[in-house]
Image (cartoon, coloured by chain):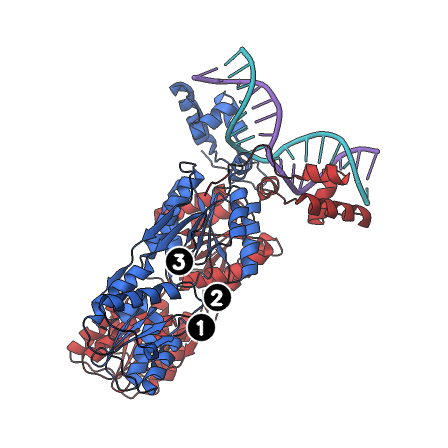
Chain colours: A blue, B red, C cyan, D purple
Amino acid sequence: MVTAPRDPFDRRVTVRDVAAHAGVSQATVSQVLNSSRPVSEATRARVTASIEELGFRPNHLARALRQQKSHTVAIVVPNITHVTYPMVARGAGEILGPLGYQVALYDTNGLRATEKQIVRTLTDRMVDGAIVFGYPLAPGDARALQESGVAIVNGNPGTEALLRWDTVEVDEMSAMRDLTRTVTARYAGQIAYIGGPVDHNTAPRREAGFRAGMQDLGRACDAGLMASAPYTWAGGRNALAAILENGMRPRLVVCANDMIAIGAMAAAREHGLDVPGDVAVTGYDNIDAAEMAVPPLTTIEPFPFEQGRAAARLLLERMTDSYAGTARHLTLAAEPVDRASA
Amino acid sequence: MVTAPRDPFDRRVTVRDVAAHAGVSQATVSQVLNSSRPVSEATRARVTASIEELGFRPNHLARALRQQKSHTVAIVVPNITHVTYPMVARGAGEILGPLGYQVALYDTNGLRATEKQIVRTLTDRMVDGAIVFGYPLAPGDARALQESGVAIVNGNPGTEALLRWDTVEVDEMSAMRDLTRTVTARYAGQIAYIGGPVDHNTAPRREAGFRAGMQDLGRACDAGLMASAPYTWAGGRNALAAILENGMRPRLVVCANDMIAIGAMAAAREHGLDVPGDVAVTGYDNIDAAEMAVPPLTTIEPFPFEQGRAAARLLLERMTDSYAGTARHLTLAAEPVDRASA
DNA sequence: TTGAAAGCGTTACCAC
DNA sequence: GTGGTAACGCTTTCAA
């Protein structure tokens, strides 16, 4: 048998063709494909054979139009190149992909205008759901999506307000409190904290965790040792350098993320201090560089894959209407990872 | 949160509604939306006003079915959590997004079975194009996609065979040769090379670059100083440790990627050697950790955003049929980044 | 310059 | 258990 190379002008094989070939109606073919109603074993076999023989593949576009469902889930993030988001996307994809959902990637670039435009696109394209990760969905945007029938889950919105839509969040406060307690107990000297940018949505929660941990141990936070910096290596380096150049000598520096921490370690070294011998350092995020740092960085693992999976599961329940109640707020734990830096 | 099921009574506003409201035909409305044929200024104004007033938004699904185009481009990668892929995706998205294409993410997980399944999905979903990055597209898969009208560009296939479809590649060999030459010239002692896994698609090209650079300077490659390791921190650490424990003392270690290099620096330090004082080290990829390493790592920047943009541009020409000729192979340069480690 | 109407390929409703 | 057929909302001929 010669398999004719498919001429681009050849029409695709359709349900109609299969129906004709199997001697049944289109309705029956559709049913066999979707198990949407009982069919006798005999005809099912005949139809399956025809599908096989003709090499029929259902046209997704037609199905989407008919059902008003694109079988697509959008992942909306501020910047896909930031380490955690690809992991979140992968976690979500692990759940969604096998179920036939396509994962579409949208990058807001941190711009409000882009956020709005993305919301329009999502409704126009009739995506079934959206996982909005890393920033708080604007209430108006959430409403617009919901009213268009787009299910939503907001991951790490980083706001204290009780949102009227499903969220998945990491308990950064508790994780930081925990780490602070464990590590601070090891050092008798002064403790410094280098937080993130004051306007960044995760910064207050991590700082609150640090303060709570200190309080748990009855240790005081010295205002002169509380700094804030951009979430970057340079930010951490400059912040600790400033502290050291002010003549302060913290025994431990708790940092709001790993980049800051690794920068702080560099500053310590530049000032002739050994880590952790003279000054201990901790981070948050457990990025690749944390394990590769010298010394390896004590930090907090936020399990980004699990965040993605959890968001996908919640979304799925909304999309399939297996849950249609009021907003759910899921909180996941993050865990300290003890390494050599503190 | 209550996801309102789409109310059957407030049907979406359709072209039909706009046409009725403006007192024109659907054809005219369609034309105004797509500028597909001339329209008098008067009616255009009337139609635009109606669109505005009714808040009409075209239904993408219907358009897609009619045109047999999903206006979606797939980005297919082995593992989206590997640093370069998100950058490639973002670069491609920068070009494609503003043109109305949706970017869908597909992760092969490095599995041939998954690759095949993705190809099926892409044809079923009628994506307009696919950027396959980081592994060589199987010839059969390429054919299947092309026959289904899916435009393709293969990024960093990492094979020497001349592929019958468009490719974008980085000239890793020249970049490595260049770096090897520049850096080797600084050291009189022996030079070691820690390559990637022998079966990995980029490994031979980088090693070839190293060998060529050495040859350019008339320096010999000592077989006892040629190692290969997984592309990981541990891989690099173990590989250099083994070399050192064999009693060899390379003055410079050229590594096939940054993770290996940073691991090698750790091994050097553990053996009481100063970097770069006793042993210099170089990497490849210019990951975040390279800049944060102590000392900062001399490496090679492969411009992943530009790779994504370039792939998107080639794909675009195929999708719009503004190019329909034979396969094009675009080669991009990577550049040495000189830092303190060598 | 505009309109009427035929699809695009499914699914889902209503009969039988 | 099965078939006929009307949508889904748009674009695109073909006529006027």
**Label 3 close to label 2 by CB (< 8 Å):** no
For disc 1, the marked residue is B334
CA distance for labels 3 and 1: 24 Å
The mark closer to the camera, 3 or 2, is: 3
Residue visible at 40% across and 74% down in the picture: A229
Mark 2, secondary structure of its residue = helix
Mark 1, secondary structure of its residue = loop
CA distance for labels 1 and 2: 12 Å
Horizontal arrangement in the rendering, residue A139 relative to residue A301 (left or right): right
Tell me the kind of residue under disc 1.
Answer: Ala
Residue B251: percent from left, percent from top:
26, 84
Q: Does residue B15 appear anywhere in the picture?
A: yes
Mark 3, secondary structure of its residue = helix
For disc 3, the marked residue is A86
Q: Quadrant of residue A281?
A: bottom left
For disc 2, the marked residue is B305
* Badge 1 and badge 2 in a common chain: yes
Tell me the kind of residue under disc 2.
Answer: Phe
Q: Quadrant of residue B203?
A: bottom left
Q: Nearer the viewer, residue B300 or A112?
A: A112
Horizontal arrangement in the rendering, residue A79 relative to residue B216 (left or right): right
Q: Earlier in the sequence, mark 1 or mark 2?
A: 2
Residue B85: percent from left, percent from top:
42, 61
Q: Does residue B340 appear anywhere in the picture?
A: no
CA distance for labels 3 and 2: 16 Å
Establish if B313 lies above or below B303.
above
* Badge 3 and badge 2 in a common chain: no
